[in-house]
Image (cartoon, coloured by chain):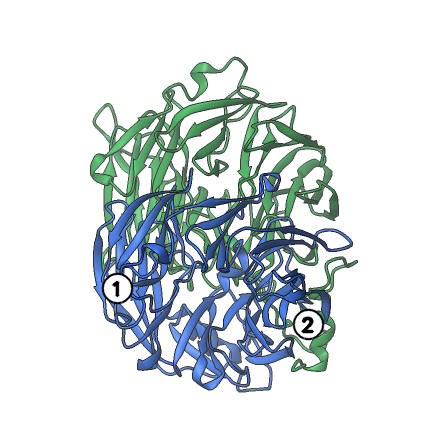
Chain colours: A blue, B green
Amino acid sequence: MPFPALLKPLLVAGALTLLGSAPALADTADARPALRGTGDLGVVIERATGSVALVDTTAKRVLRHVEGLGDLSHASVKFSRDARYAFVFGRDGGLTRLDLLEGEIAGRVMQSGNSIGGAISQDGRFVAVSNYEPGGVKVFDAETLELVVDVPADYRTADGTTAQSKVVGVVDAPGNRFVFSLFEAGEIWVLDMSGDEPALTKYRNVGSQPYDALITANGRYYIAGLFGEDGMALLDLWHPERGVTRILPDYGRGEARLPVYKMPHLEGWAMAGDQAFFPAVGRHEVLVADTDDWSLSGRIPVQGQPIFVMSRPDERQVWVTFAHPDNDRVQVIDTETHEVIETLSPGESVLHKEFTARGEHIWVSARDSDTVTVYDTRTFEALATLNAESPSGIFFTHRAHRIGL
Amino acid sequence: MPFPALLKPLLVAGALTLLGSAPALADTADARPALRGTGDLGVVIERATGSVALVDTTAKRVLRHVEGLGDLSHASVKFSRDARYAFVFGRDGGLTRLDLLEGEIAGRVMQSGNSIGGAISQDGRFVAVSNYEPGGVKVFDAETLELVVDVPADYRTADGTTAQSKVVGVVDAPGNRFVFSLFEAGEIWVLDMSGDEPALTKYRNVGSQPYDALITANGRYYIAGLFGEDGMALLDLWHPERGVTRILPDYGRGEARLPVYKMPHLEGWAMAGDQAFFPAVGRHEVLVADTDDWSLSGRIPVQGQPIFVMSRPDERQVWVTFAHPDNDRVQVIDTETHEVIETLSPGESVLHKEFTARGEHIWVSARDSDTVTVYDTRTFEALATLNAESPSGIFFTHRAHRIGL
């Protein structure tokens, strides 16, 4: 074996699947962290303390906590092309570049007063952040965090003045493009970073108040949910000349039979074959659409108002988290029978979940229990329970290699 | 920046996208390699010299060559769960564990006299190798390369004696299973490694001489090509109780209008939505099947006998390599129009190609030109040409995170 003796203990530890307390990342013999692959690393957002937990999905443990990331409510994470760096998008406009190997912050900019997520370009060179205050999108160099492009979300209001719109649902698309939605303006914009100069295309009057969006796993369809009316706005990126069309006309608050505790996340759409599973708004249902024509094809009763609906990588199961007051349970749906086959109770205020790349495990965060539970997705056995400070979002490095994640 | 000064040059170099000569992996200040993420690394097989080239897909360069891997004709590669180690399956029965960070061999066993590929289990703990001489499958511990399970491919011959069958088409499947085919026996076996004891299920009389196989990206369908008759054998792993069925009854040599220079690789099937693109046998055509019922739905004329048919990750393009004597060209098919939209000439004896994880680039090996060319898949511009010794297979670490790759 070619490894220096000092490294062996960490290498062996990294290989076992059930270990106790976490070792430090750093090799004890000197200041340099141990060599390790970055394919089985992840980040858990600890919103209450403005920190993140760096995790190892092979050892199923927390490697260390990193503090100083600001307001992390609704924070999300993207990963660099080499899966070494995590880009953490904070609610306070902070963009933090986190070195997963050093376990330290490797760059941080306060790029706006209020932001809501970001994306990394197909080639890994650019990081885009969508902002609320002021509205717009800023694009940064992924290495240096230097500002590359500033795209103010200017639009003409009803009274003829120009204002800035909040921007939501920014995603990466093939061709080194970023796609995002303007809440007040009701527009979808495409920013093409593939040429020497950025090119911006605007789609107007797509619907009232797009509040979130997703892009399908193949990067073809960009779908925005509408807060101000029913239905959703769809842009087929293979045929931009067709413009933005409307799908699922009944989708939204108009059909709600119950008070809406929280608008569902669209990022959570689960694709399985030609079925899309997604959360109903204000109803105890998971909806199913046929992705060939985006028509509604099914309704699945569940135990609460669904928030995140995520597909196991092999598409055989869909896992669902819920809004208050039913957010202490997680349900599992069989994508073939559309039946709920399991209900789990991971803790109080379950906020997020993440599958390992090939789907053998899922990690579930329970904010008010300060725990992250790792389940076997075949047996539903709880394999490990990790301590974290008010954990919310969970993000694994394999996202670096997926379109739209 | 938290990096020790000594590391900075390498870290910066790793970030640029157009660099000159390749630095060594090792930090010049001491014996230890520089820290780096492993998400943008890859391995290029150099069959003539029994070596591999370690490559960086961000810098588009060769990092170093590693020798001593034996006979690498038809060699293939799988990656460890953490994307640090490559498992190289040599034709001579050698199984080599390669450390991509140290740039050295981290374990090697001669596990048979003649082997033809392998797989790594969903949980990353087990590596399976399919063998020709003697026939069978051996499963090794991914850390130590210690033998865990030996599965001889015994079967009863026509004259009632027991013999060992060559094993082909071993893949990983969800549920920590390995699936493989027995050439002489005409059987498909499923080895379940999820329990305390391995469990083996045998499907007999699946067809004459299965010679290669694939598993779909969601891990549901295992499809074996038949050398001894037309048609293909399909096992639906969601419904093993249905047994093995026959699909594409006309597929094979029976419809060949031309001499068959080489049986196509099934690993190369390209899935795009509900279409599967795959090579015709002995014909200048790429065939298209409807994955809903696995019926033949189209034929696309191409410039030679196709060998590998691979889909760009966004499913908008399919790239095709060809058998001798047309193996100096690569063609690109639009998956929507089914038209050939580009023909490229990367060099002599084009053997393999690999897309970057999100599809912005493709790397193409030209064995007799000793080059690997990196193309932009949108503009078809050649971005870089790397030197390698008779390069064949190209494998990037993002495969660690995909079912069946």
Which corner quadrant of the image does residue B327 belong to? top right
Q: Tell me if residue B175 comes above or below residue B223 in the rendering.
A: below
If the image is split into quadrants, where does the N terminus of chain B sit? bottom right
Query: In the displayed structure, would residue B339 be above or below residue B36?
Result: above
Name the residue at 45% across, 44% down. Answer: B117
The residue positioned farthest toward the front in the image shown: A159
Mark closest to the chain's N terminus, 1 or 2: 2
Number of the label disc, if any, that sits on residue A304: 1
Q: Residue at x 62, y 58 (%)?
A: A121
Q: Which percent across, then down, holds residue A285?
A: 27, 56
Say which chain tag 1 marks.
Answer: A
Q: Tell me which corner region of the image, top left, top right, bottom left or bottom right, holds residue B363.
A: top right
Instruction: Please state the horizontal and vertical placement of residue B88, each as a whole percent of the image.
Output: 51, 51
Mark 2 lies on residue: A145
Dot 2 alpha-carbon crowd within 10 angstroms: few under 14, some 14 to 19, many 20 or more: some
Tell me the subunit letter for badge 2.
A
